């Protein structure tokens, strides 16, 4: 889509090039409209990398012919503005329905892409009736597409990608009979495939990727007879793929990955297959059965992605891929086959630059030699027992992933001599060290090195100065954190969790604090006060949990406006509640659990607003005081169904790449669950248990409709349980035990259909236990030690009814409680939140990031 637009702009500008040299071409009415249009926005912003940018409208001068202004092209004969290109000009403000832009009636090309025009796209855009090209990509538009857009009958190129448009496409778009390129990707469109497109036979490019479309594709896809590019990646389409799609003679690129297509893929009339198809992405769907035989007939393919194809553990004839001599990209990862594949089978594919065979049992001969100039090789989870020796001759290799195998011993020293190697993932093996001297890695130009989950021991490797991402968690490194790390001036990510490091944080950490965005030092024996100067304003994720840090929480964190994840659990930090964290509006996870924090967690007359917070855990401290009724107002992420950018979105792309993750412990129903992984599931919880909080439970808690776990146990809360808790319709675990709550249990809680576990024990509750499926399914221990509480499942009866519990009932309760323990573990595994940093690698535009869980651990706590 972008390439097509660039070509159009280039051709159009070549026709009008002499217009900028003509004198006084610009008509006064056109100049006035442009000048007024400029005043409708304020110009502000800069590129994230700090590079300077030409803010086009700021270069405009009223005393200069407007046809020579930056971004303007005029008709050389009439002086009318025919092109306005203000791409990436840092315009801020809505596009008004009465904008002076609409007075430029003869515009042919309008490009406002990559500006902040947040708001609805006005109906009046259709007043620009001569538009050929309309590009509004990345403008923060939202709402529905106006039906008036269908009045732009001359439109050939329409790009509305990377916005927040919702709903269905208006039927009026069927009037755009001249449209050839349509870009609607990366929005929130929903509903079935837009049938209106089937009547637009001029379309050559359709991009609907990364939306919320669903349903089955229509069977008559071949009506799009001129289609060259078709992208429906990352939606929720299901059912079978119509064979008519493969019959379109002009089709070259077909993106259908990451949907829910299922069943075997069959094409009966193989002779009608398109001979032009070069790009086919079908990975990460629900296909099952054998790999289709017709694949071997697509001899023009250069890109083939069949990842996660479920062959039902059948055998795969990998030799069928040898007919595809033009392949440069082949992804067969996790296709669920019991075949053992000899890697030499792929030797004849001499053009391969990308090969992913992860999840396939591989046989690699010691004498094997790969002829293709492989650049990206992923062989994760392939049951490899020895370091592949053929890699020594792969001089083009830039990315290597051999994680999750059974490779033992030392990493060979020749690996670091590969001239283009930049990204290495050897995690989850049994490596013990590095062959060669301590500085064997240092001469290389590695950008990312993941050695996590091995058995590496001292000495700690001397890393090259080029290192940006280092992941060394779950090893056996010990002693103080080496000061040599401080020489890594470009370091972005440092993960040393789950080792045996001790001592204090080196003061020299301030050397890279200006660039570091991830620092994970969890589960070591580090001590002392965390140095303020080691925290830079680029920090997004800080995990210091499970150490011996003392003193106060570093107040320099207030400068970390990008901070999303903060975990300091299980330390000895002695401080008051950090109210200043409310200024960190991107914070999504806050865990202060098991420290020596003390004092109130509310400030009189001051609302503690965390708009993006989804995990709030301050349990097992010494917090005191009363929470005001409005305490939880402004906690938007827990109140509304909203999309929040994933914690630490991919900065380097790839599939199953890296072992970088955060870890959060959660308490529910007497279990401590440590949830670990690189996947991400929206999980919203509040845990204030084990403190000395008093007063009523804030009424505003009922605003948090998306809350899944609420634990307020072991405090000194008083008053009644509010019936408004019935608003927490997603709640799955509720623990109010060990407080001083009185009154009756509200029967409204029985309406919470997802509530699998509740605990009201050790309070002063009274009256009958409400009759309801969710409440009655609880064991008697959930209501114990409330002397005036009665009714099933307790032994105490209410009124004259004879509900005395027999020994058989007690046995049933005990059995049910044991089953409930199992149920909770199952639920925790299903809903388990794994806040994570999603790892991958950026290598050109070949790789796409995606997320997959690595592992989860659940262990019991009997404390």
Image (cartoon, rainbow, N blue to C red):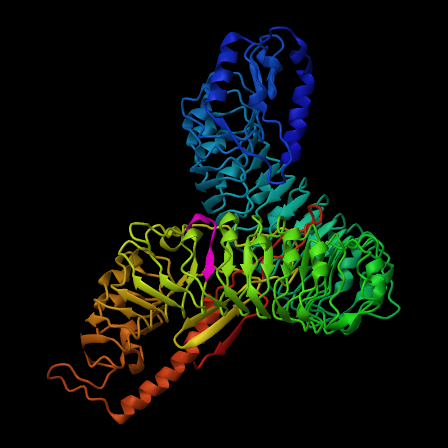
Name which residue lies at 63% across and 58% down. Answer: 507
Q: Which residues are magenta?
A: 582-591
* Position of the N terminus by quadrant: top right
x and y, in percent, of residue 693 in the image: 31, 66
In the figure, residue 461 lies in which quadrant? Answer: bottom right
Q: Quadrant of the C terminus?
A: bottom left
* Residue 770 placement (x, y as % from top left): 21, 73
Q: Count of labels shown?
A: 0
- Against 234, residue 1 (above or below) is above
Residues 28 and 687: in front is 687
Q: Is residue 101 visible?
A: no
Is the residue 486 above or below the residue 98 in the image? below
Image coords of residue 520 (percent x, y)? 59, 62
Per the image, is 747 magenta? no
Residue positioned 44% across, 53% down in the render: 581
Would residue 175 be found to the left or right of residue 2 on screen? left
Q: Taking the image as drawn, is residue 359 in sight?
A: yes
> Where residue 470 sits in the image (x, y, percent)?
68, 59
In this view of the protein, which residue sits in the foreground, 637 or 396? 637
Q: Check the image and report above or below for 539 versus 409.
A: above
Single out the residue that lies furthest toward the left. 800
Q: Is residue 584 magenta?
A: yes
Task: Classify residue 400 by image quadrant.
Answer: bottom right
């Amino acid at each position: 889509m972008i390439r097509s637009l660039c070509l159009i702009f280039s051709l159009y500008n070549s026709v009008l090039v002499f217009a900028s040299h003509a004198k006084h071409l610009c008509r006064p009415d056109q100049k006035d409209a442009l000048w007024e249009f400029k005043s409708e926005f304020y110009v502000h912003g800069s590129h994230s990398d700090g590079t300077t940018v030409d803010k086009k409208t700021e270069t405009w001068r009223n005393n200069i012919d407007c046809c020579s202004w930056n971004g303007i092209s005029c008709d050389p004969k009439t002086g009318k503005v025919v092109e306005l290109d203000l791409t990436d000009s840092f315009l801020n403000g809505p596009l008004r329905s009465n904008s002076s832009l609409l007075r430029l009636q003869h515009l042919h090309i309008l490009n406002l892409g990559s500006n902040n025009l947040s708001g609805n796209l006005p109906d009046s855009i259709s007043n620009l009736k001569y538009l050929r090209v309309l590009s509004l990509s990345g403008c923060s538009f939202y709402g529905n597409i106006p039906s008036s857009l269908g009045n732009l009958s001359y439109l050939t190129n329409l790009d509305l990608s990377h916005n927040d448009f919702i709903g269905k496409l208006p039927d009026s778009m069927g009037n755009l009979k001249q449209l050839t390129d349509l870009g609607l990707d990366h929005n929130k469109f929903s509903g079935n495939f837009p049938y209106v497109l089937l009547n637009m036979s001029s379309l050559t490019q359709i991009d609907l990727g990364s939306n919320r479309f669903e349903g089955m594709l229509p069977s008559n896809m071949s009506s799009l007879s001129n289609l060259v590019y078709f992208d429906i990646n990352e939606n929720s389409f299901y059912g079978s793929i119509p064979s008519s799609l493969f019959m379109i003679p002009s089709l070259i690129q077909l993106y259908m990955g990451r949907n829910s297509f299922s069943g075997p893929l069959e094409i009966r009339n193989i002779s009608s297959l398109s001979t032009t198809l070069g790009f086919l992405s079908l990975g990460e769907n629900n296909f099952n059965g054998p790999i289709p035989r017709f694949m071997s007939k697509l001899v023009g393919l250069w890109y083939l992605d069949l990842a996660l194809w479920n062959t039902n553990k059948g055998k795969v004839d990998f030799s069928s891929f040898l007919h595809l001599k033009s392949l440069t990209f082949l992804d067969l990862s996790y296709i669920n086959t019991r075949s053992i594949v000899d890697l030499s089978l792929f030797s004849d594919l001499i053009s391969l630059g990308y090969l992913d065979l992860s999840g396939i049992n591989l046989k690699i001969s010691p004498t094997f030699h790969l002829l293709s100039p492989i650049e990206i090789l992923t062989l994760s989870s392939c049951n490899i027992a020895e370091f592949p020796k053929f890699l020594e001759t792969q001089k083009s290799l830039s990315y290597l992933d051999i994680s999750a195998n059974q490779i033992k011993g030392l990493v060979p020293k020749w690996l670091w001599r590969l001239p283009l190697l930049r990204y290495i993932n050897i995690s989850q093996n049994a490596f013990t060290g590095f062959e060669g001297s301590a500085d064997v890695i240092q001469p290389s130009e590695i950008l990312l090195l993941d050695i996590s989950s091995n058995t590496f021991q001292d000495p700690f490797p001397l890393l090259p100065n080029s290192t940006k991402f280092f992941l060394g968690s779950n090893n056996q490194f010990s002693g103080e954190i080496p000061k040599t790390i401080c020489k890594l001036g470009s370091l972005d990510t440092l993960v040393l969790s789950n080792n045996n490091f001790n001592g204090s944080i080196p003061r020299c950490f301030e050397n890279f604090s200006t660039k570091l965005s991830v620092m994970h030092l969890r589960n070591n024996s580090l001590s002392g006060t965390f140095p303020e100067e080691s925290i830079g304003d680029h920090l997004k994720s800080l995990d210091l949990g499970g150490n011996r840090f003392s003193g106060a929480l570093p107040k320099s964190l207030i400068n970390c406006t990008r901070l999303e994840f903060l975990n300091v659990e299980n330390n000895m930090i002695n401080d008051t509640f950090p109210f200043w964290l409310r200024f960190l509006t991107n914070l999504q996870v806050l865990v202060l659990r098991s420290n020596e924090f003390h004092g109130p967690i509310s400030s009189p007359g001051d609302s503690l607003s965390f708009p993006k917070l989804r995990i709030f855990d301050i349990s097992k401290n010494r917090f005191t005081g009363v929470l005001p009724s409005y305490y939880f107002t402004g906690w938007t992420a827990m109140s509304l169904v909203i999309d929040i950018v994933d914690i630490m979105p991919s900065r380097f792309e790839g599939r199953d790449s890296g072992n970088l993750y955060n870890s959060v412990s959660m308490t529910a129903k007497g279990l401590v669950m440590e949830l670990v992984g690189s996947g991400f599931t929206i999980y919203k919880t509040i845990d204030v248990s084990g403190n000395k909080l008093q007063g009523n439970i804030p009424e505003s808690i009922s605003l948090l409709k998306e809350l899944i776990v609420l634990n307020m146990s072991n405090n000194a809360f008083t008053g009644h349980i509010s019936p408004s808790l019935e608003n927490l319709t997603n709640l799955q675990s509720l623990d109010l035990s060990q407080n001083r709550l009185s009154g009756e249990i509200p029967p409204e809680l029985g309406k919470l259909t997802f509530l699998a576990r509740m605990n009201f024990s050790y309070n002063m509750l009274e009256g009958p236990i409400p009759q309801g499926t969710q409440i009655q399914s609880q064991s008697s221990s959930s209501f114990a030690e409330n002397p005036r509480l009665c009714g099933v499942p307790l032994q105490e009866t209410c009124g004259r009814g004879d509900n005395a519990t027999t020994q058989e009932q007690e046995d049933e309760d005990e059995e049910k409680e044991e089953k409930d323990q199992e149920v909770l573990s199952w639920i925790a595994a299903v809903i388990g939140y794994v806040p994570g940093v999603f790892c991958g690698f950026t290598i050109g535009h070949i790789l796409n990031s995606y997320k997959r869980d690595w592992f989860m651990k659940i262990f019991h706590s009997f404390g």
